[in-house]
Amino acid sequence: MGSSDSIPKSPTWDLDSVFPGGSDSVEYAEFRNQIKNDLNSAVEQFKNLPEKLDDSSRPAWIGYINKLQELSDRLSQAHAFVECLVSADVNDTKARQIFGEIDVFNSEFEKIKVLMESFAKNQPDDQWEKLVTGDELKDCRFYLNEMRRIAAMKMEPEFEALAAELAVNGYHAWNRLYDKMYGDLRVEFTENGKTEKLSVGQLANKMISPDRDIRKQAFEKLEGAWETRATEASMALNYQAGFRLSLYERRKWDSPLTEPLLMSRTKKETLDAMWSAVAKAEPKIKQYIDAKKKLLGIKNYRWYDQSAPVGASGKKYSFEEASDLIVGNIAAFNKDQADFTRMALDKRWVEAEDRSGKGGGAFCTSFRAAKQSRVMMTFSGTFDSLSTLAHELGHAYHQWLRRDMPYFAAGSPMTLSETASIFNEFLITDSELNKTDNPDEKLMFLDMNLQNAANLFCNLHSRFIFDNAFYAERKKGLVSRERLDELMIEAQKKAFMGTLADDGYHPLFWASKLHFFLTDVPFYNYPYTFGYLFAGGVYNRAKEEGPSFADKYIKLLSGTGRGTSEQIAMEHMGVDLTEEDFWLESVNRVMSDVEPFVKLVGDAK
Ligand SMILES: [Zn+2]
């Protein structure tokens, strides 16, 4: 922090117009109280509904489902609001209490969902079809059908309920234990003759230093720190994977990809097509890394060189300049989005001030009942900050387009939820890159694009390959710590396309990356690459078709909750995601930056 000294103060957000008074708000307390009562009565009402769906009971069920959706809108708003309070002031203890209250609401709601699943599963096809195709629920048809289909793939509801209950202190507990280890790890780090204790998160910041010695030290300290926890980490990984595999066996799911693919509403063939297109980037990735090595003056490209910054920009943006730039670029493509973005900024939906006591990171969340969104970030005036602002405002627009939709139609699989946000990033980077004649700035922008792509094509791919290999071996028994290291190196060899030097791998990556331990989202790696390439494909079309694409863009974003990834791509762009073409086009788009990058490096030498 303190990096934004040279620009005017950035604005804070308005939360009072939703619930005045922050965590002490009387209105907010009443809102939560109403949710609590409605959750209780929803369970009672379910018990009183006719068990069989037929022509006479259908209206009652429609009414009930709509009630659940309205309740979901409010529940998600209650959650979003406290999320905002906590992030704006990490010391707000009252808000932390409220968080706990809402966690209980959420688990109550999960129980109602289990009841709904068992109801859906037990109805005859023809009656179910009548329910979901009627006027009242047709927008939620996809969601309801999916719920019914997945319910049929699971164990009997009482077994599922038991498994979910045991998972709290079993499966998810391994994740909690890992998080605790991660949070507690400290290493001694020496910089400018000063030694201090750093957390793993702080070490990660050192890995983006322009000074290679700093990056090297950070990496070695990271490996060293995890070396002392490798046995515990391998136990956590093995046992949580064992839990999942037992559950899958009971459900008769033969692949560990079944669950992640259901969650991302995507087919295996689509992932295969995507990775196969990524593999075709190999010659370009190699050219890029070779040029970057030249620029950095290094012979061996190692793990800790992945985020080495090059080029420079002394440019600082005030929040107002950043806002104007974003709105201006969006306006050239989509007037509706430009108007929305201006409105969100004017109504102070963005918390951007650089001050202490705020949470880190950035997010966008929606108040579904109030039909508004809020963006949380710390604006520092750098291009990175500008890009984050654009990214989060993209999320806000995506939410805005779905504000009038019923809750069950307004979701989005994680493969498509980054479409508008990454699209905005592309728009802003392109515009700034085209504007500058300064070779150092050009180099910086091009490298940012390529570094990002290399990360998604190589680093994220290595995680996907590792997860697959690990689960295949875990099926046969526990996988030793040494074997995990081996599998990790093999995965990196394959995914990094031979760019990493023999002494440049990160064997303990499986321990140091928290994503491998996330029990809520298994295989949380490919969605990043998917989201990026999907947004790139959409961006390609927007550039080809110009402003006339805006209508299609709006329809696509509005519809992300009403189909599978493949269905949505086909419906709105006429492309088949199980084929390589669409992905390859998107890969080639970013790889077209390699040539100018290589040329600039040549000129600079
Ligand atoms: Zn995002």
Image (tube, rainbow, N blue to C red):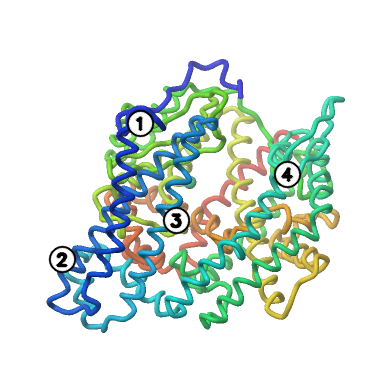
Along the polypeptide, which appears first: circle 2 or circle 3?
A: 2
Amino acid carrying label 2: it is: Asp
| Depth check, front residue: 15 or 284 | 15
Can you identify the residue that label 1 sits on? Answer: 25
| Residue carrying label 4 | 184
- The spot of residue 29 in percent (x, y) is 34, 38
> Separation of disc 2 and disc 1 at Cα?
39 Å
On screen, 550 above or below 530? Answer: above
| Among the two numbered marks 3 and 1 on one chain, the one whose residue lies closer to the N terminus | 1
User: What whole-number distance in Å separates the C-alpha atoms at marks 2 and 3?
Assistant: 34 Å
Q: Left of 338 or right of it: where is 88?
A: right
Figure quadrant of residue 499: bottom right
Q: Which residue is mark 2?
A: 135
Looking at the rendered image, the disc whose residue lies closer to the viewer, 2 or 3, is 2
The disc labelled 4 sits on which kind of residue? Answer: Asp
Q: Earlier in the sequence, mark 2 or mark 1?
A: 1
**Which of the two labelled residues, at mark 3 and mark 4, occupies the earlier sequence position?**
4
Within-10-Å neighbours for mark 4: few <14, some 14–19, many 20+: few
Q: Secondary structure at mark 1?
A: loop
Closer-to-camera residue (400/170): 170
